[in-house]
Amino acid sequence: MPVQPELLRGDATALSASDGFSLGATRFMATAPLRGRILVAGATGVPQTFYARFAAHAAQHGFETLTFDYRGIGRSKSASLVGFQASFLDWARLDLAAAVEAMPDDGLPLFVIAHSFGGHALGLIPNHHRIAGCQVFAAGAGWHGWMSPFERARVWMLWNVVLPPIVRWKGYLPWSLLGMGEDLPLDVYRQWRRWCQFPRYFLDDPAAPELARQCAQVRVPIVAVNALDDAWAPPSSRDAFLLNAYPRATIERVDVDPREMGPIGHVGYFRPKALPLWDRALAWFSERGSGAEAFSQGSARI
């Protein structure tokens, strides 16, 4: 079913984090009988508008869906990132946690679509017990050693040669200058760079052992989807992080072959050609919905 253009806008709203920070968000109300709710936890530097087509598609099939921007990007952006205080931990513990709290707790299941960083943040929020299931796309450990030789060299150069002087000059990560996404707060850059030094990302950070302990409390059923052509998060990187981060969760791993669906890379999971992946996620959510009939749009070869 094609997404109706008028549904792509959704209803703009605002969320209030526990520290009072206001986050820009968009609510896509279900246009079919309501079977559950979905929260989209986006990737680093990717604005919520990128997920609008998926959110509208989910809404057309009975899932009220919420997208939002982490502090410092998109509609949660400040006038300047110079001196702006925000870290990955803030994005998880304050922003994603606020988005979970903003979803009604009325007996209908709450699901999460997590893209890249969203899969890391899942284990760092205090209210993950409210989540009935999570589909994680493109989550990996971030360590260059899991990448192909070419990407390994490119990422090493980025972290160690290209980015440090640019960040010192600007006072934040001007990610947009490299065509990589939205500009990022300084502490997001610092944590990202540090954690990408470790084979299992922040799970191996000796300065923050509590992060692994927090993740280990998660019991949310997870489907972890990674494309074979995802240069930043290939399946080996996914396994290094997710299987160790969430030992108490049931994790189903899905490898997407680009020969079957076309190129996916790190962000293609939310472009229109990935519709079979969306339908598969909605079917999985429906199976876990309270009394909801299973969603069916035919089977996709993955």
Image (tube, helix red, strand yellow):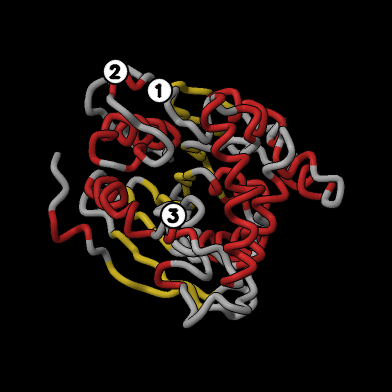
Amino acid type for the residue under numbered disc 1: Val
Q: Which residue is mark 3?
A: 178
Secondary structure under tag 2 reads: helix
Q: Earlier in the sequence, mark 1 or mark 3?
A: 3
Pick the front one: 299 or 114? 114
The Cα–Cα distance between marks 3 and 2, rounded to whole angstroms, is: 30 Å
Of the residues shown, which amino acid type is indicated by label 3?
Leu
x then y, percent, for residue 95: 56, 65
Q: Position of residue 155 (x, y in %)?
A: 57, 40
Q: Residue 49 lies in what quarter of the image?
A: bottom left
Q: Earlier in the sequence, mark 3 or mark 2?
A: 3
113 left or right of 194? left
* Helix, strand or loop for disc 1: strand
Cα distance between the residues tagged 1 and 2: 8 Å
Identify the image quadrant of residue 213: top right
Which residue lies at the image location 62% right of the left edge and 40% below the top edge? 156
- Circle number at residue 256: 1
Q: Quadrant of residue 142?
A: top right
Q: Badge 2: how crowded within 10 Å, few (<14), some, or many (20+)?
A: few
Quadrant housing the N terminus: top left
Image location (x, y in percent) of residue 28? 30, 59
For badge 2, the amino acid type reads: Glu
- Disc 3 on helix, strand or loop? helix
**Residue 200 pos. (x, y %):** 71, 35
Are the residues at dot 1 and dot 2 in contact (C-beta closer than 8 Å)? yes
Residue 224 makes an appearance in the image: yes
Residue at mark 2: 260
